[in-house]
Amino acid sequence: MRWRAWLRGGGGMLLWLLLAACRAPATNLPTPAALVDVVTATSVPLATETVPATWTPDPLHLEIAPTGGPLPSRTPRATATPWPTRTITPSPTPPPTATNPSQPTPVPPPPTSAPPSPTPPVIAAAPNLLPNGSFEAGWYNHNGIPELQVPDQWRLEWEAGANPLDPDPWNAYVRPESRVLSRAFLPAFEHPLFIWDGNQTVKIFKEHGAISFRLLTTVDLAPGQYELEINVFPDLIVDYTPAGGKIWAPDPLSGEVQLLADGRTDGWRLPLFGQKNTFTYRFSITEAHPVTVGAAIRGRWAVPNNGWFLDDWKLRRVGE
């Protein structure tokens, strides 16, 4: 019984190991099947597995750095003192006007509009005292010369020979040519340039020649004040552009104008070339008599085209 108890207590395994060690080398070990039977027949408690201790972490030690003390509180800025508000005194409410329902409210009359300004009287312009002042009444050939067409009731005078303003023989004065031209003899684009009244204009000119001439007429005048007005277009050309445009004389002394009346004048004037110029001259006479009026014109140098267009001349009485 003790032997069996010993075997149950684990001695069987030890005995088997001793017997195996003492056997001769030729002896075969028991088969695994018999060993299994022994193990199965023997109730051997399994050794209890020892569980290793678990790792216990060190307690967390948190050090809190000392603070620098509370931040200084911010001092608020002083609040702006508001301006005192203006107390509006209520205006007294006028008492309601008593209305008499039995009488209709009168309707005010419409405002009277200001009377219209009086229309100034139209003062008729004084008549033009020049005969054939716009050169519309025909023309004649001076001394039968075809190149000299002179407006009716006018006469043309000119200088020929030495030029006191320039002794160069090339610039000696020569007789000009004169034409009375209607619109039919001018390109359409030149009509407003050279014709300012009616249908005709006068052109006095010379190519490559210096000229000095006068266009005059005589008028019977009573005592009074008068104004002579002439219009001229100096067509003084020294060259042309490649496109055919005119290049005007560069020297202002290339053309001059002088108004004449009763043997008097106010001197030479310098017109602008390539455009219409209007000149006036006032004079007085004390006794009724025939008065010669007109203009003297000169182009002192022999430019390629020394031309002048004349139209719409006037003479009017302007005072006593």
Image (cartoon, helix red, strand yellow):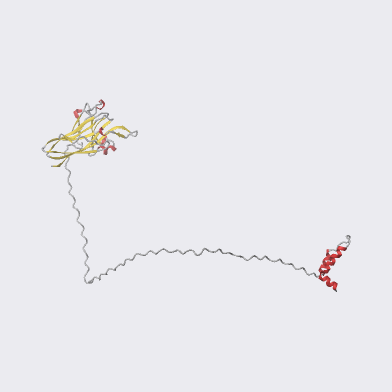
Q: Measuring from the top left, give residue 91's x and y in whole percent.
A: 27, 68
User: What is the residue that sits farthest to the left in this orientation?
Assistant: 287
Is 39 in front, or is 123?
A: 39
Residue 2 seen anywhere in this rendered image of the structure: yes
Is residue 37 something that shows in the picture?
A: no
Residue 290 picture quarter: top left
In the displayed structure, does residue 17 sit left or right of residue 178? right
Please tell me how many numbered marks the rendered image carries.
Answer: 0
Which quadrant of the structure image shows residue 7?
bottom right
**x, y percent for residue 57:** 65, 65
The quadrant the N terminus occupies is bottom right
Residue 138 image offset from top left, x and y in percent: 20, 34
Query: Nearest the camera: 142 or 285?
Result: 285
Q: Is the residue 201 above or below the residue 94 in the image? A: above
Which residue: 83% across, 71% down? 6
Furthest-bottom residue in this view: 1
User: From the viewer's perspective, is residue 26 above or below residue 296?
Assistant: below
Instruction: Identify which residue, 42 or 102, lies in the foreground.
Output: 42
Indicate whether 243 appears above or below 55. above
Seen at 85% across and 66% down, the residue is 16
Q: Position of residue 280 (x, y in %)?
A: 20, 39
* Near-viewer residue (270 or 18): 18
Quarter location, residue 302: top left
Image quadrant for the C terminus?
top left
